[in-house]
Each structure stands twice: as C-alpha cells, then as structure tokens.
Image (cartoon, rainbow, N blue to C red):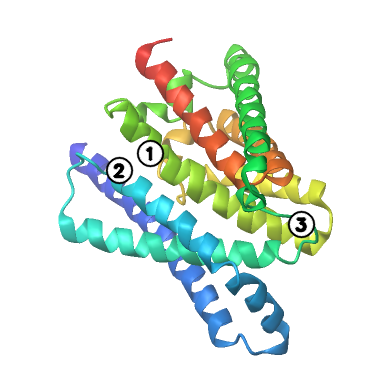
Amino acid sequence: MEIVHEAGFMNDQLAITTAQLAEIIITILVFSTIACLRRHPRLDGFWTGMFRQWRAAAILTLFYLISLGISLTGLEADLPHIVISTVASGGYMFCLIMLGLGLTAKIAGFEPFQLRRGVKAISGILIGVLILLVLAGLINMPIGQGLIALGITGPPEVASGLEFFQGLLTFQVFFMLLTGAGIAEEVFYRLLVMSGLWWLLKRPSLAILISAILFGLYHLSPLNNLYLSFWDYPVYQFITTFLFGLAAAWVYQRWGLEAAILGHTLGNSTGVVIMKFGL
C-alpha cells in the first residue's frame, strides 16, 4: 500500500510540474513571438503599448523575486534548483506582466498601476485593500460556515488547504502568499485574463464574471500546488474562490493591481494566522 501511495504522489507531483512548466513555456513563447513579429501591422501597436511599460514590469518582477527569495529562507533545497527555478520564474513573470500591460494599454482610460498617478493614489489603494479584506471575510465566514452547515465541506483549514502552511514561520507565510497568491495569481487572472477579456468584450462586468469563473476552476487544476487538497471539497473551493475572484476583479478595476495584490495577500495571510494560533 505504501508503494502505491508513493507512486500516486509522484504522479500528482508530475502533473503539477508538467502543467506549471507548460504555462511558463507558453507564456515565454507568446512573448517571444510577439517580440519577433513586432513590426507586423497587427502587432506593432500592441508591442509599442507593451514595451513602453517595461520599467513597471521590471519593478514588479523584482518585487516578485525578492518575495520569492525571502519565502525560501530556511527551506531545504539545493542551490542549483533554486537558481534555475528563480531564473525561470523571473523570466515568466516579466513576460506575463508585459503581456498584461500590453492589453491594458488598449483599454481607454484604465491605469492598472495606480502608483503611477503619484502619492495621491495611495489612499485609494488602501481603500481598495480594506474593501477586499472585508469582502474576503464575508466570503470565508458567513458563506464558508453556511457550506459547512450544509455538510458539503469539512474543516476550513482542510478545505482551504491552509494546513500546508502550518509548520512555516509567519513571515515566510506572508512572503510565500505574496509571491504566489498575491503577485502571480493577480497578475495572471486580473492583469492578463480580465484585462484581455475587458478589451475583447468591451464589457468590464462580463470580463469580471468570466475571469472569476476561470479563477475558481484554476484552484481545482494542477496549475495550483494545493489542488489535490482542494479536491477534497471541490464545491466549497469553487464557490469561495469564484466569489473572491469577483471581489478581486472588481477591486482591480476600481483601485488597480496594487490593491488587488496586497488585499489578496493579507486576506490569505489572515486566514493562515487564524488557523495557526487557533483564533
């Protein structure tokens, strides 16, 4: 039985690694293809709108790599593996941000990075963070408790996969969540997916809805490291992540990517802290 269990674990890890590697390769290939064909009439405008924002992409990528490095502090991993994964992750994130910024450049009047408006934007960002935290609390408490009462889920720490962080230090948890849930997920599902849908459909409300559905499904796919834990209670997981996706997408549209990233990170971190200390 132990051999069968280990074989199943290896297959699961292979599925996760394969899916995530494919995502990285496809993203870099798409960006590279656009770069090579940038003089094509249909791509020239997109490339121009994207390339002029490379500094913002580089800064966010740097924050991502710093957060990734801090989150790995004290964890057992060989140096070559860390170097390779860091370089690959950094390249992937830069390409992802650039593609997303290329799409937002096509949306009239929309600024994804509110800090580019100046210091006066900070108050708006903080309002967006606070609102997202309140909405996340409403989703996790009344709705989550309601699902538990209906008997379609289990203990919150199991159903949400938060037990994964049980043995980590609080600062590691924060930066791990900032790297993954905060920056990576918000860049992909808000900056890239939602912005792309917004530009294509010309209807931000529909873009918010579709991107939230995709965000919920993502948590049940091998693209997410914890998807096997989430499949223990898939209904709970999809409903809560779909609703959070709606909230995060609305905050992104209204207050920008910074508010979505920080609100997502703090919301998840709060859940872990509550679980760790039994609050």
Q: Mark 2 and mark 3 in contact (Cβ < 8 Å)?
A: no
Q: What distance separates the C-alpha of mark 2 from that of mark 1? A: 7 Å
What SS does tag 3 mark? Answer: helix
Label 2 CA crowd tier, 10 Å (few <14, some 14–19, many 20+): some
Q: Amino acid at mark 1?
A: Phe
Which label was assigned to residue 70?
Answer: 2
Describe the element under mark 2 as helix, strand or loop: helix
Where residue 234 appears, as percent x and y from the top left, is 55, 34
Kindly identify the amino acid type of the residue bearing the numbered disc 2.
Ile
For residue 104, above or below residue 166: below
Question: Which residue is pictured at 33% across the width and 31% down the height?
Answer: 171
CA separation, marks 3 and 2? 34 Å
Q: Which residue is mark 3?
A: 198
User: Which residue corresponds to the image point at 43% horizontal and 38% vertical from the top-left?
Assistant: 177
134 shown above or below 258: above
Q: Which residue is mark 1?
A: 175
Pointer 2 or 1: first along the chain? 2
Q: Which mark is residue 27?
A: none
Which of disc 3 and disc 1 is earlier in sequence? Answer: 1
Q: Residue at x 30, y 48 (%)?
A: 69
Distance from the alpha carbon under mark 1 to that under mark 3: 30 Å
| Nearer to me, 4 or 117 | 117
Work out which residue is located at the far right of the displayed protein and give it.
203
The residue mark sitting in front, 1 or 3, is 1
Give the foreground label among 3 and 2: 2
Foreground of the two, 121 or 182: 121
Kindly identify the residue that appears in the image at 47 percent across and 64 percent down: 94
Find residue 142 and report its image quarter: top right
